[in-house]
Image: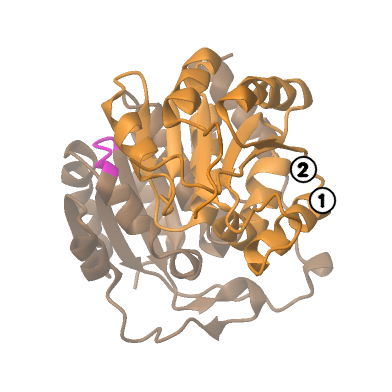
Chain colours: A orange, B brown
Amino acid sequence: MVEQQLQILRPETLIAEFKKIGVTHIITIPDSETNYLYELMEKEDWLEVVPVSREGESMAVALGLNVAGKVPVVLIQNTGMMESGDSIRGMALDTGFPLLMVVGYRGWTRKGHTPDSAAVYTEPFLNAFRLNYYLVETDDDGARITEAYEEAVKDKKPVVILVGDEYHGFNR
Amino acid sequence: MIESKEVFEAFQEHRGEAIVSVQGTSGKHWADVTTNQNRDISMGGAMGQSTAAIFGLALGLPDQKVVHFDTEGALLMNLGVLASIAGKKPENFVHFLLDNGCYATTGGQPVPNSEDIDYSVIAAGSGYAATYNFDDLEELSTSLEEIMSQKGPVFVAIKVPAEVENLPIGMRERRATRSRGQTINDLRSELGIS
């Protein structure tokens, strides 16, 4: 029998947090757990979705939007985040602008062990880049998104939300 | 081929109020030609990502003409950005490519398949609204009015000679240029963005 969480993280929760923050653009490469979130975002007239071809582009596009006075958020998976190291360094950390990065935590498990190296190296990667991060697993954690963004604004640097949604609550 | 400085001199005649970004060894000549530094912006800083940053700027400033002078070495590092740009169809974006066929800043080693790539074909296949190819200054000069007036994204590939730098970086001539942060702050002030 498949174990189920009592609570899940609904895509609507993320969108409500994005609206509260004043997000204008989501720069994204979809991953397998965010399809329904993507569909919902496309329906919001206050939010422009910017699909990119490789995750490293996302921090650069976000920088350009920030210079233009917009409020971008990056939505990618941990695998792509690790591929984006030079862009995180050169486009986000070195320029010093507030950037919320919402990162799908592929391989995350609460059981302590994961066979997925994407999960094994995610937090060491973030620590190497000295990026603070918040884990969001259920709707109860949603307020951490606003908290993370406020930290990004205060410190003028990227702050990461790790979406540890192991039961695919983003899908319908 | 067209000398990079001649490209910039021809472009300057049609710049108007456009925001301009340059990069690479070819881009250094823009500093001698520009007449509106407050609308010049530097977005380099990560390998192959300045084009994506200028694309973001164009998306965020749809009422401003945004012009990027790219290089083929940088574009090859992130060729997928052509599809990203074409997908959002920024009408205000003009994307020049100064193609010298090599990594001039590291000694002139050729980029992969440097002799046989047609970047304008790649841009057209990615979905750019219009694409051009030039290796003659007169043809470029007579086309710039059309290039700058039509709806983007527009892609303009230009063959330029390599200006190879072989001295160690610490021994190269340094020009007094503004930092990336200063160009960002100056542009924001110019546009009234807080």
**Residue name at image x 24 percent, y 57 percent:** B140
- Would you place residue A170 above or below residue A53 in this image? above
C-alpha separation, residue under disc 2 versus residue under disc 1: 6 Å
Q: Is residue B90 magenta?
A: yes
Mark 1 residue crowding within 10 angstroms, few (<14) / some (14–19) / many (20+): few
Q: Are marks 2 and 1 in contact (CB under 8 Å)?
A: yes
Pinpoint residue B162: horizontal percent, then vertical percent: 50, 75
Closer to us: B118 or A76: A76
Horizontal relation, residue B91 to residue B159: left or right: left
Q: Secondary structure at mark 2?
A: loop
Q: Is residue B192 magenta?
A: no
**Residue name at image x 70 percent, y 56 percent:** A122
At label 1, the amino acid type is Asn
Furthest toward the front, the residue is: A1
Pinpoint residue A127: horizontal percent, then vertical percent: 82, 50
- Would you place residue B114 above or below residue B61 in this image? below
Pinpoint residue B194: horizontal percent, then vertical percent: 59, 13
- Would you place residue B108 above or below residue A114 in this image? below
Q: Which residues are magenta?
A: B88-92
Pinpoint residue A148: horizontal percent, then vertical percent: 69, 27
Chain that bears disc 2: A
Q: Which residue is mark 1?
A: A127
Closer to us: A62 or A124: A124
Q: Which residue is mark 2?
A: A131
